[in-house]
């Protein structure tokens, strides 16, 4: 049901019956290592290319989620997945392996919540009994496509972020036990004219703020309704800007409940990540791994996740275009 | 950002960019310069030592000794790139590793390694000079312009 301008309220509250997170070597050294179902020491995962490694990450995340739900892949009715690589090949190729009816998504790093919104919509409207959501990113594959070769020696500024190597999957179903998706707010594309791809946090922060404000306005809720409000991958720089921007707009989210997946995922003493994590996998593994685990343990009851995405391409950046950004918010309750 | 670009932005965008800039960590330029100076200096010292080594033990002339010394630095860089160490040194050193030949060798080696998965012709061959290409193009062009100037000056009897 539509509420306000851009928020869907799911009357039947579709349930996330199972979720899984798979990560790479830097994620294994990070804060959330214990929330991963599978961690790889080899960035290539024994594959012969980074792109194939990303495909493998998705396959493993999906298979683990299906297994945890005690289902077979034939039982999964629809698959929504996405990633950052050109023409989303890792998603399409892993969908080939799973051979489940598939819809590919591209929402840059907001894909996880875009997928979760669509899967919940599908289940809530009774067009499906269940739907699987998956989002992934791979550090080296993204560096190769968006920036320079991985081994190229260039000095990144302190605002740069580190693309997460990982995939998160969640199985949404009409019936079952687990955290439930209650509402989602679909974001608008916001462009503040920023052009620096080494400072995505600052570019994406206004999109996150716009969606957060829309969510609370549409549902007429107060931030205190939630135990945790997490942005997707703003990193240390963008998250601070978003927090201050919300205060400037007269919107007070208590500091202790406002966090960011890109800040949480890595430790402070991992200098290689600079301002924090980014990529589709960042919000996917943190939400589908860490947050949902905490909800199942009873530590969190109501959370709002705002996945943020920078909708740029290497070509648009070279043609001196600015970076349009988007954010989708999903409310999960148990 | 140039003032021309700023004019195209709406007042809200300008206000936000100002707001965001105040909250961003700045590049530590002075500290980066110091690091670049020392790392670059160390690399050049190694180069000089290699050069002296070739003069002393292999009887190269002072001028010719630069060639094998350069070759050794290139080989070292390519090895460090292949072992995945060079990018970490470069993140620390910045311009210190970019300016000498080490930077140039790294651009070629890293691109070649990266695109090996797309095959030896279209992958390695087609992408090897992806980053080094502009350096060669503008390097050769600048050399051409400079030589034209030198030739003209000589013809006019200035030099």
Image (spheres, coloured by chain):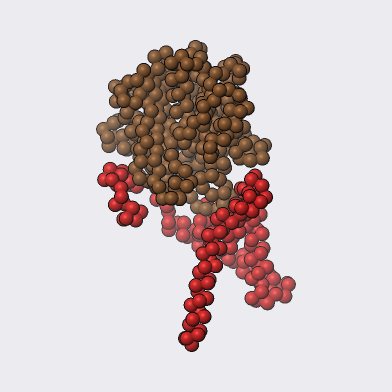
Give the letter of the brown chain. A
Depth check: B57 or A170 in front? A170
Depth check: B65 or B48 in front? B65
Task: Work out whether A60 lies above or below A138.
Answer: above
Q: Is residue A271 left or right of residue B115?
A: left
Task: Work out whether A240 lies above or below B33.
Answer: above
The residue positioned farthest toward the right in the image shown: B58
Q: Residue at x 34, y 42 (%)?
A: A192
Q: Colour of chain B?
A: red
- Residue B105 screen position, x and y as percent: 61, 59
Depth check: B91 or A324 in front? A324
Residue A261 seen in the figure: no
Q: Quadrant of the N terminus of chain A?
A: top left
Q: Quadrant of the C terminus of chain A?
A: top left
- Residue B91 screen position, x and y as percent: 52, 52
- Residue A69 screen position, x and y as percent: 57, 17
Task: Work out whether A114 lies above or below A321.
Answer: above
Q: Is residue A186 left or right of residue A295?
A: left
The residue positioned farthest toward the bottom in the image shown: B157
Total numbered circles: 0
Depth check: B41 or A287 in front? A287
Residue B119 seen in the figure: yes
Q: Residue at x 47, y 31 (%)?
A: A111
Q: Residue at x 64, y 53 (%)?
A: B125
């Amino acid at each position: 049901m539509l509420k306000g301008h851009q928020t869907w309220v799911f009357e039947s509250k579709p349930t996330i019956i199972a979720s899984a997170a798979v990560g790479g070597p830097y994620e294994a050294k990070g804060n959330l290592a214990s929330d991963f179902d599978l961690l790889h020491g080899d960035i290539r995962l024994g594959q012969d290319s980074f792109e194939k490694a990303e495909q493998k990450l998705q396959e493993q995340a999906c298979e683990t989620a299906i297994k945890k739900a005690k289902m077979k892949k034939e039982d999964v009715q629809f698959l929504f997945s996405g990633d950052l690589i050109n023409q989303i090949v890792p998603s399409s190729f892993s969908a080939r392996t799973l051979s489940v009816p598939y819809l590919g998504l591209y929402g840059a790093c907001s894909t996880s919540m875009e997928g979760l919104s669509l899967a919940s919509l599908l289940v809530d409207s009774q067009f499906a009994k269940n739907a699987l959501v998956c989002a992934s990113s791979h550090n080296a594959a993204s560096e190769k496509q968006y920036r320079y070769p991985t081994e190229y020696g260039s000095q990144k500024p302190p605002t740069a972020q580190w693309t997460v190597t990982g995939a998160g999957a969640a199985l949404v179903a009409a019936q079952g036990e687990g955290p439930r998706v209650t509402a989602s707010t679909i974001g608008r594309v916001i462009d503040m004219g920023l052009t620096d791809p080494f400072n995505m946090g600052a570019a994406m922060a206004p999109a996150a703020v716009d969606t957060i404000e829309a969510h609370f306005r549409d549902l007429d809720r107060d931030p205190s309704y939630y135990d945790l409000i997490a942005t997707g991958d703003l990193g240390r720089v963008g998250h601070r800007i978003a927090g201050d921007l919300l205060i400037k707009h007269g919107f007070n989210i208590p500091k202790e409940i406002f966090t960011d997946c890109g800040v949480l995922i890595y430790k402070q003493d991992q200098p290689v990540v600079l301002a924090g994590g980014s990529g589709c996998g960042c919000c996917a593994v943190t939400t589908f791994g860490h947050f949902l685990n905490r909800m199942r343990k009873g530590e969190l009851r109501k959370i709002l996740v705002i996945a943020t995405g920078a909708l740029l391409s290497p070509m648009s950046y070279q043609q001196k275009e600015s970076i349009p950004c988007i954010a989708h918010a999903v409310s999960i309750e148990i | 950002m140039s003032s021309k670009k700023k004019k195209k932005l709406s007042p809200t965008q300008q206000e936000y960019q100002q707001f965001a800039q105040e909250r961003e960590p700045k590049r530590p330029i002075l500290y980066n310069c110091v690091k670049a100076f020392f790392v670059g200096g160390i690399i050049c010292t190694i180069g000089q030592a290699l050069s002296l080594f070739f003069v002393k033990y292999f009887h190269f002339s002072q001028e010719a000794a630069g060639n094998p010394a350069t070759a050794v630095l290139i080989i070292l860089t390519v090895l460090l790139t292949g072992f995945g160490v060079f990018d970490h040194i470069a993140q620390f050193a910045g311009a210190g590793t970019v300016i000498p030949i080490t930077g140039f060798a790294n651009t070629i080696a890293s691109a070649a390694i990266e695109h090996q998965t797309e095959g030896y012709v279209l992958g390695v061959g087609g992408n090897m000079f992806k980053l080094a290409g502009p350096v060669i193009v503008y390097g050769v062009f600048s050399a051409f312009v400079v030589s034209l100037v030198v030739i003209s000056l000589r013809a006019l009897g200035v030099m």
